[in-house]
Image: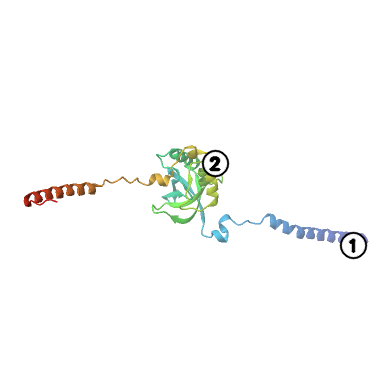
Amino acid sequence: MLILALSKLLDEMYFLNLLLCSLLLLPSFFTEHAVEPSPDSSAGDTDTQQTAYKVIGVKDGDTFAVLMNGREQVVRLEHIDCPEKKQPFGAKAREFISEQCFGKYVTLIHRNKYDRNKRLIAEVILPDGSNLNKMLVKNGLAWHFKKYSNSNEYAQLEAMARKNRTGLWSEPAPTAPWNWRTPKKKKKEKPVTVIHEKLSARAFTRLNVVQAETGCHG
């Protein structure tokens, strides 16, 4: 009987030890398996959207098209401005993003903002997690578009590319694409002066004729 009682007591103690160990391990289990909030779930970025779409066409260094809800949607890369096609490094910028994203699914980070050409303004995240917008500036294939962006990070990336004379910054005097797009005003001739000179000559001739007819002289 004593042996049976001791055996039963040991079984109960073993069960209690297992229960105690389980309770002690629960906090660490929940900590390890806790779900971290997604980048767009913070209070300051509640309007930011992140969705993946397939790139179906590349127009230039900072503009491409994706298939969105069965229709083509043109995307304009946010914070940057690439050289135009006829500018130095314009073709290289287009070639760069074609290699990086054409035919692939990319994630667009945007706030449902469109420019006057109905292009969606967005940052582009590649399948490997790289930021395409920042890559272009870092490689000297785009300017930080300060007119529409006050990002310190993009400003620093441009400053570093300038310092290292990377890409377009290897040119002696690179022209910003927004200045390139501005049409040059032609100097207008001033025919008014010529007209006045002709009128003055006619008036002087007329005055001489009148003086001759009247016999009056100055």
Q: Quadrant of residue 87?
A: top left
Q: Quadrant of residue 91?
A: top left
Q: Is residue 126 visible?
A: no
Number of the front mark, 1 or 2: 2
Q: Position of residue 105 (x, y in %)?
A: 50, 46
Amino acid at the residue labelled 2: Lys
Q: Is residue 217 left or right of residue 2?
A: left
Q: Is residue 141 left or right of residue 213?
A: right
Which residue is disc 1 drawn over?
5
Mark 1 surroundings within 10 Å by alpha-carbon count, few (fewer than 14), some (14 through 19), many (20 or more):
few
Amino acid at the residue labelled 1: Ala
What quarter of the picture does the N terminus occupy? bottom right
Q: Position of residue 208 (x, y in %)?
A: 12, 48
**Relative to the observer, which residue lies in front, 102 or 218?**
218
Q: Position of residue 9 (x, y in %)?
A: 87, 61
Q: Position of residue 216 (x, y in %)?
A: 10, 52
Q: Report if the CB atoms under discs 1 and 2 are less than 8 Å apart.
A: no
Closer to the chain start, of discs 1 and 2, is: 1
**Residue at horizontal 44%, vertical 49%?**
75
Mark 2 surroundings within 10 Å by alpha-carbon count, few (fewer than 14), some (14 through 19), many (20 or more):
few
**Residue at horizontal 79%, vertical 60%?**
20
Q: Is residue 212 left or right of residue 55?
A: left
Q: CA gap, disc 1 to disc 2?
A: 84 Å
Q: How many marks?
A: 2
Element at badge 2?
Answer: helix
**Relative to the observer, which residue lies in front, 118 or 69?**
118
**Relative to the observer, which residue lies in front, 78 or 148?**
148
Element at badge 1?
Answer: helix
Which residue is disc 2 drawn over?
163
**Residue at horizontal 51%, vertical 57%?**
48
Q: How is the image coloured?
A: rainbow
Residue most toward the right? Answer: 2
